[in-house]
Amino acid sequence: MTSEAIQPDVPPSGTGCVECLDNGGWWFHLRRCAQCGHIGCCDTSPAQHATAHWRETGHPVIQSFEPGEDWFWDFSTEEAANGPKLAPADSRPSDQPVPGPAGSVPDDWRTKLNR
């Protein structure tokens, strides 16, 4: 992992998946790019925007953006990684529903997850 892959001072891009919020989509769990702060949805989510962000930008390291989780993942090595504490906020708001965002999740959301 290169030193530029994790930029601890960069804040998250927001409280939800950037692309899902822009196009009316929804997510299961959220991931944060450790380099630029982009918030994307996990690979279980229908659109898999965190992985798409890595493929588009080459930013290899993400951190969970879920309350109580602080693990990192390096797409380039396909391994868990260690990393420093990132700039606040370190997770989505605890009152934000899972899946989210509120009002955008279909009733049959479980059938639409990637497994």
Image (tube, helix red, strand yellow):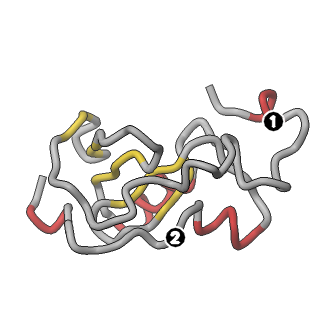
Q: Position of residue 49 (x, y in %)?
A: 56, 56
SS for callout 2: loop
Please report the residue visible at 69 percent of the width from the left and 42 percent of the height from the top: 99
Image quadrant of residue 80?
Answer: top left
Residue closer to the observer: 40 or 114:
40
How many residues crowd mark 2 within 10 Å: few (<14), some (14–19), many (20+)? some
Q: Position of residue 2 (x, y in %)?
A: 10, 59
Q: Quadrant of the C terminus?
A: top right
Circle 2 is placed at which residue position?
14
Q: Is residue 84 left or right of residue 30?
A: left
* Callout 2 amino acid: Gly
Extreme residue in the right direction:
107
The label nearer to you, 2 versus 1, is: 2
- Give the Cα separation between the discs numbered 2 and 1: 23 Å
Please report the residue visible at 63 percent of the width from the left and 50 percent of the height from the top: 95
Q: Position of residue 88 (x, y in %)?
A: 34, 65
Residues tagged 2 and 1 counted as in contact (Cβ below 8 A): no
